[in-house]
Image: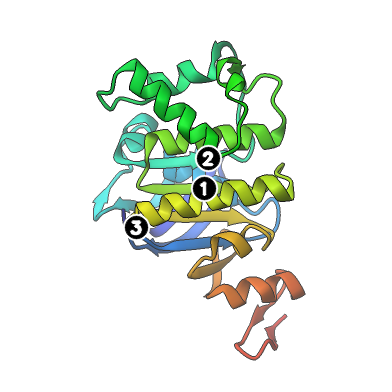
Amino acid sequence: MEIELKNLEVKVEDKSVLKDFNLKIHEGEIHAIMGPNGVGKSTLSKVIMGYPNYEVVNGDILVDGKSILKLEINERSKLGIFLVYQNPIAIDGVSFREVIKASVDNGKSLYEFVKDLENNADKLLMDKKNLHRDFNVGFSGGERKKNEILWLLMLKPKFIILDELDSGLDVDSLKVVTDTLNKYLEENPKTSLMIITHYTRILDYLKPEFVHMFKDGKIIQSGDFKLAKLIEKFGYNQTFDINEEIINE
């Protein structure tokens, strides 16, 4: 899936958060959006998903060349857009398996669905008993992130947004989750991925081709993985040249 954000300006409660934001992700590409806390990285993910409290006052969001601004969240999901939340919610009274079953409509029998679900849980080294627990209730942050990835594997999206996936995951769990994602991308080479983070740790595993520094509501510099390492070393208060020299304080 190809997605393009064109001259995007977004307001939240009359406050401008995204300003003339431009980004194009071709099918099969991995892009990383890096920025400090509180600059609007999560806003970007929710705007793409179509959250109602985020007002697009200018610009457009195109999927395979067609605008999706008028589509509701569920309609965008049906196109194949999937957001892995920074802080996944919990729902009392409904099991994780029931939530996933309600969202997956692939014509398979209940037996086939359960088999697929358990096979994918095994890939993530998950305790299958957790599939019958209330949705994310009593789960640790790392367990909730694994639940999100399991849901992703069942829905088979074409464009994936990871909003600070590494938050709450220990080193071993991060390795399991990213290995699983890399395998998914290998098996689905047209799937595109946008990683939102402020650490390079997850990028060591998912290896983006493009890295974008996000600040003041827009991308201020783009580059390859080397840019991520420069940000890690020097921070977000400057831009860089290829010789690792600070060129703009």
1 and 2 marks in contact (CB < 8 Å)? yes
The image shows residue 67 at horizontal and vertical percentages of 27, 48
Q: Residue at x 57, y 32 (%)?
A: 147
**Residue at x-position 49% and y-position 19%:** 97
Image depth: mark 2 or mark 3 in front: 2
* Distance of label 1 from label 2 (alpha carbons): 7 Å
Q: Nearer the viewer, residue 186 or 13?
A: 186
Q: Is residue 71 left or right of residue 55?
A: left
Report whether residue 51 is seen: no
Q: Is residue 145 above or below residue 110?
A: below
Q: Residues within 10 Å of mark 1 (few under 14, many from 20)?
A: some
Determine which residue is flagged by label 1. Answer: 180
Q: Quadrant of the C terminus?
A: bottom right
Number of the label disc, if any, that sits on residue 213:
none
Instruction: Tell me residue 169's x, y (percent).
Output: 70, 44
Residue at mark 2 to residue at mark 3: CA–CA distance = 19 Å
User: In front here: 225 or 176?
Assistant: 176
Using the rendered view, name the quadrant where residue 64 is placed: bottom left
Image coordinates for residue 222, horizontal then vertical, percent: 52, 73
* Mark earlier in primary sequence (2, 3): 2
Residue type indicated by callout 1? Thr
- Residue 77 spot, x, y in % from top left: 36, 36
Q: Of tags 1 and 2, which is closer to the observer?
A: 2
Quickly name the residue at label 3. Answer: 189
Residue carrying label 2: 123
Which residue is rendered at x = 30% and y = 51% of the image? 63
SS for callout 3: loop
